[in-house]
Structure formats: C-alpha cells, structure tokens
Image (cartoon, rainbow, N blue to C red):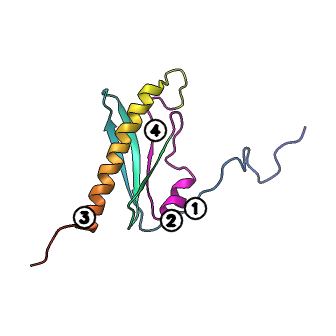
Amino acid sequence: MSGTPAGERLGAGRCIASAAEPAATRTSAHELGTADGADVTGVLRTVPGAATVVCLIHPRQDFTRHVLVPELLMRGFAVWTQGTRSPNNDLSLLHEQAVLDMAAGSSLAATEIGRWLAERHPVGRTSS
C-alpha cells in the first residue's frame, strides 16, 4: 500500500485553482427574502462596463468561489453567486423552493446591475 508522496496533500489536483479577480471588481454580499418567506444569501461581483449578469446557482453547493467567477469578470460580465435554503442537504431539497430561491437572487442581480449602470451611464440627462 502506497501513501501520499512527500509534499503532496491528500486530494491534491481535485480542484482547479482559479485566477485572481480583476483589481476593479466590486463585491457585495446580500441576504434575501424569497416569495415564500425563506432566507437565502448571495454575492454580486461587478466590474466596470458590465452590462450582463451571469448567475451561478446550485441547489446543494456553494458557488461563491467557483472557478468561473474570475474568468467571467475578466471578460466583462458581472457575476451573481447564490446558494439555496438547503445547502448540502438532499433530504430537504425541494426543487420548487429552489426555483423561488433563484428568483429572489435573479431579481436582486438585475436590480443591482441596473442601478450600477444608471450611476455610471446616465440616460436622458442634459447639462446646463
């Protein structure tokens, strides 16, 4: 029976190391209420010029540090990562509730990126 080679940790190579987020990334954490009164959390990351939000949501896993987050930010997308009310628990996962959780996050992401864009790209304002 062979052990782990010296200097290599158990499970090494299972996870892909992600790139660093762009320096201009703005990160905000949010606690949300769903339509049926449950609480969920998520993280919105935006970069200058982002006009589209990519939502990364999984019913049973935390996608906050997902490897795609920095890749999407580097390509000019905002990224919303969110969990559901039943992380890591298949026994209590109801897909109908997960859809309500996702709807709360999607609504916030659209509102926040819309506000962020309006601050930076005002429409209809005239200078005096």
Q: Secondary structure at mark 4?
A: loop
Tag 1 or tag 2, which sits nearer the N-term?
1
| Label drawn at residue 83 | 4
Task: Work out which residue is located at the far bottom of the displayed protein and give it.
Answer: 128
| Residue 103 visible (yes or no) | yes
The residue under the point 72% across, 50% down is 13
Q: Label for residue 61? A: none
Q: Which residue is mark 2?
A: 74
Question: Which residue is at 39% across, 34% downward?
Answer: 101
Q: Residue 39, percent across and down? A: 35, 32
Q: How many marks?
A: 4
* Residue drawn at 46 percent across, 64 percent down: 76
Residue span colored magenta: 58-87
- Closer to the chain start, of discs 4 and 1, is 1
Name the residue: 77% across, 54% down: 7
Q: Is residue 64 magenta?
A: yes
User: Does the residue at mark 2 contact the one at mark 1 (Cβ under 8 Å)?
Assistant: yes
Query: Taken as a whole, is the magenta stretch helix, strand or loop?
Result: loop
Q: x%, y% of residue 31? A: 33, 40
